[in-house]
Amino acid sequence: EHSMIFAMPNKPGEFSRFDFPEVLPAPLNGIWAILKNNEMLTWPEKVRFAIGLLPAMIGGQAYVEAQDGLTVKEWMRKQGVPERVNDEVFIAMSKALNFINPDELSMQCILIALNRFLQEKHGSKMAFLNGNPPERLCIPIVDHIQSLGGQVLLNSRIQKIELNSDSTVKNLILSNGKIINGDVYVIATPVDVLKLLLPQEWREISYFKKLDKLVGVPVINVHIWFDRKLKNTYDHLLFSRSPLLSVYADMSVTCKEYYDPYRSMLELVFAPAEEWISRSDDEIIDATMTELAKLFPDEIAADQSKAKILKYHVVKTPRSVYKTVPDCEPCRPLQRSPIEGFYLAGDYTKQKYLASMEGAVLSGKLCAQSIVQDYDILVDRTKRSPQAEMSVV
């Protein structure tokens, strides 16, 4: 179903829905969803919010790009949008989009998301990978690469990018001492990893120097298996609207690989996580259970006197997607670098989906397009090297 479902902090255990009718095209389906929901925003608040958004509707992409210098909170004050819109909508939206709060997030990020909701009928529709990522995402990619004659080397961390005298890439030196040669090199890592790998000779080049502004944001994923089936949940992604949690889902309902008619497995995003990333797993689980007790007041207690934890798993990512703060948009690089034969892919590179998995995938497609467009140049480069065939690393 096409819905956005928010927990109601002032009414523990209750939810508020935005339902997008399938029969209506965008943006009418979104307008209908907002108008039909009277639990989160009053009519005067909806009107003031709509008036605040008018410049974005009229000004289009130029207006959206010009808001990169403002945080969400700053933009709200400038446009006279009620504070409750932040409390009811933007906090949840900011944490879902970039794992940070509205006082840090660039308003451009929110406007781009809203723009997609208004332009695309299914732009706000939620979906889940139907299984665990290694099996359902990574292995098919590896199989595809190998079917076309490519190789995938695991446990092969890059230690150094070695350069030729003209500052182009000579080869990659791995931590095990192995040397990898290619005619085209693509670095598809988080931006923080790329910055560690950059050769000193490249660091003052404007294209690479701008990357200093881009920093990954910490995030924590929490998986909890309970001894019973929780009733107060949906076959859907849910916005917790908790100060510590972002979105969550009961994977025993939403994902067939985890389906269990007798026990629930909750997967939650713990964000913002900067103050928690160094804390112990036990502390994080205790804090999570305190928040879950508000979402499931009849079924979960912080002391586990109700539903009991069978097992849990805490996944910490100190640097995940790039932090979408004001004035970072001009620092995002194109996939084609100024170094001949060297390309970048990753959510931080220029593409329309910002900091997201979708953005990372799109960046890979744009990177591949750049390589194809540069084919003649790269062939000439190959002819100048001792290798017989062009290869991509």
Image (cartoon, grey):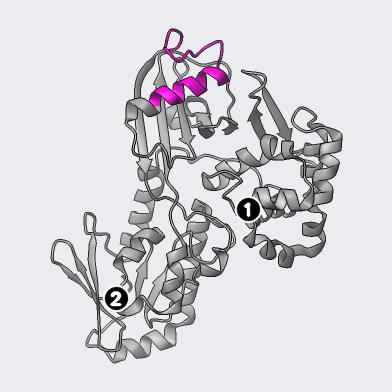
C-beta proximity under 8 Å, tags 2 and 1: no
Residue 299 vs 181, above or below: the answer is above
Q: Which mark is residue 71?
A: 1
Q: How many numbered marks does the figure carry? A: 2
Give the residue furthest to the top: 305
Mark 1, Cα crowd under 10 Å, few <14 / some 14-19 / many 20+, is many
Whichever of labels 2 and 1 marks the residue nearer the N terminus, that label is 1
Mark 2 or mark 1, whichever is nearer to me: 1
* Most foreground residue, 197 or 127: 197
* Most foreground residue, 255 or 319: 319
Q: Which mark is residue 200?
A: 2
- Please say whether residue 128 is visible from this viewpoint: yes
Question: Residue 86 in magenta?
Answer: no
Distance between the Cα atoms at labels 2 and 1? Answer: 33 Å
Residue 263, image x, y percentages: 44, 17
Residue 162, image x, y percentages: 23, 76
Amino acid marked by disc 2? Gln
Left or right relative to 156: residue 139:
right
Left or right relative to 196: residue 119:
right
Residue 259, image x, y percentages: 46, 25
Q: Quadrant of the C terminus?
A: bottom left
Mark 2, Cα crowd under 10 Å, few <14 / some 14-19 / many 20+, is few
Amino acid marked by disc 1? Thr
Q: Which residues are magenta?
A: 285-307
Residue at x 57% of width, y 47% of height: 97
Residue at x 34% of width, y 30% of height: 313
Left or right relative to 365: residue 4:
right
Q: Is label 2 in a helix, a strand or a loop?
A: helix
Residue 117 vs 273, above or below: the answer is below
Q: Quadrant of the N terminus?
A: top right
Residue at x 34% of width, y 60% of height: 193
Residue at x 78% of width, y 31% of height: 37
